[in-house]
Image (cartoon, helix red, strand yellow):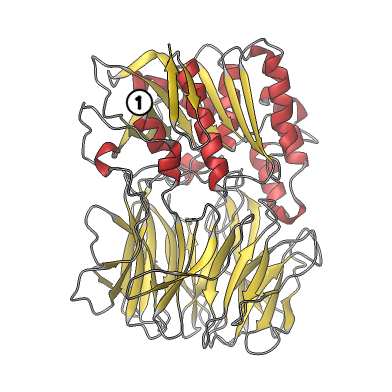
Amino acid sequence: MRTNPLPRLTALLVLVISMGVASCAPTVDRPTAQYSIADFMESTSYRGASFSPDGSKLLVSHNSTGIFNAYALPVAGGEGEALTSSTTTSQFAISYFNDDERFLYRTDGGGDELWHVYVRELDGSSTDLTPGEGHTASFAGWSADRTSFYLTTNERDPKVFDLYNYDANGDYARRMIYRNDDGAFPGSVSPDGRYMAYTQVHTTNNTDVFLRDLQEGQTGHVTPHEGDVSSSPLGFTPDGSALLLLTDQDSEFQRLFRYDLATNEKAVLVEAEWDVMFASFSRTDDYLVVGINNDGRTELRLYQWPAMTQIDLPAVPGASVTAVSFSKDGGTMAMYAGGSRFPSDLFVQPVAGGTAPTKLTNSLNAAVDLENLVDAEVVRFASYDGVEIPGILYKPHQASATNQVPVLVWVHGGPGGQSRASYSGLIQYLVNHGYGIFAINNRGSSGYGKAFFAMDDQRHGEADLGDVVASKQVLIDTGWADAERVGIIGGSYGGYMVLAALAFQPDVFDVGVDIFGVSNWLRTLESIPPWWGAQRDALYAELGNPATDRERLERISPLFHASNIRVPLIVLQGANDPRVLQVESDEIVEAVRGNDVPVEYVVFPDEGHGFRNRDNEIAGYGAILRFLDEHLKGKTVAINRSGSVLANTP
């Protein structure tokens, strides 16, 4: 299911477990050391990079303690300083203030997605900027002079988000600058505070951009069109004369446009053979950073503004640069770079260049040798009807024609998500323990053009499931996959596809791993959180309306066909999940257990739609390996609390 309309509605139920980088380097049949799930999970995940006012520190979030907290990392290198110290709920840093080291951060209630935005004060105390219960809020950017900032919140009406301006220099007094009576998604505000761009959602393939005059109360239509066109605003140019937006009008792919506010004319700024994903300006407005979704990996481009002269980004050996931010004075850039065998690390470099980037973090656990992990390969195959389907293939080092290994088809979330080319500890863990993986980007996935994206509309659990079933042959054709030991794994919508495959194609896969997947579309669509607002109608148009399409939704819901499931199944579920309610997993587990087949069920009381607690990841992913080893490898494996293998019994 597809939540965020910016730039494209692609992730309503996306489980954020990313794939490995596409690499041309082949793996070699050789012995390899094996690591526990604790070894993989003790790698550190870093997020964000906001420079302090004096440029000496970077505000980041990382989970070195097992829970995400905010930290200040010295730009010169060295130990970071912990700024928050939660032991239960992850806290994610947003941004430093302009003139002092106060900063904004956000947190929710153990994965319930009811986000609140806080200020961490200079004395270490915190101020909740969005107090109350039952609503959710998000940061919407700084004003041009950084004397105020914007937040959206649905506290007035749970179905829509209003836009507020908060004073950054006083007591955080706020005023509503946009009362959302349009059912829209507020976007950026112009540098002079007069205009706001917003998105109107019609369907998952059809969105519009409007420009609101906040002084006069008038609204202009930026993207008039016919047919299905997906558009979204990104932000205004530094001088406020134009709006940058993404749209696939007259193209298969999203292109970056400049919309002139005076003439209402649009001109292409950046286009590629893939989707442009994002664009943002440096703090000094000298540079424009543009991200392109190049076959499942991020291609970053840097342009001098306003000349749009492309500048070479610093190179990080063996890695792809995926994000860039700039210091207040524009003299230093911070960037994330990672590969398929290692998670992203944070680097800094003077904008003027002349020196190699300085590495500030070491994300991968030092106990894990890179040489024992695998690069990934992008492959394509012709599906049941001839449609070309892409995916990412992971071959264990120990796999060969004479040493065939069990394999898994990995299905991403969404349904319009994408198996991305970035590091995944879970995938590397499974591959390290001898499981080949093909992460399919079935029809309906984002990143391959709008026609491909729409191919599964009103055909979920049918057209896309056909691709998943057909992809089994990709693994078998490698010669190193054991055709008699093929499982399927997925999270969120991918978890639904696991259940659908076992219920509707019961003879194809030997085991299933469902990580909080939908089992009953009628319930899921009827229980959409109120703050999804207009997206609900878009989902109904794509998946079906439970009031009018009940017969079809029952037909594609595995719960109503659970009697067909006759292979071992493991289900993981977060008790606080607002997207896939726990009852979805409760009921499918109960139903499949009635078939007298092995079913394991692991519920995490402090998780929502995805893992944020390292101990839970270790427990959950360790349980997955134990399950696979027992039911695909034919072994009973004991795994201790740290995830280490204690014993194997044939």
Q: Regarding mark 1 in the picture, which secondary structure is present there? A: loop
Q: Using the rendered view, name the quadrant where residue 49 is placed.
A: bottom left
With 63 as the anchor, is 167 left or right in this view? right
Q: Using the rendered view, name the quadrant where residue 258 is placed.
A: bottom left
Mark 1: give few (<14), some (14-19) or many (20+) Cα within 10 Å: many
Q: Which residue is mark 1?
A: 434
Determine the residue located farthest toward the left in the rendered image: 354
With 378 as the anchor, is 127 left or right in this view? right
With 441 as the anchor, is 193 left or right in this view? right
Which x, y percent locates residue 144?
53, 85
Which x, y percent locates residue 18?
44, 45
Q: Which sits in the foreground, 505 or 306?
A: 505
Residue at 43% x, 53% y is 44
Which x, y percent locates residue 35?
37, 35
Q: Is residue 72 visible?
A: yes
Q: Is residue 20 above or below residue 484?
A: below
Q: Which sits in the foreground, 390 or 589?
A: 589
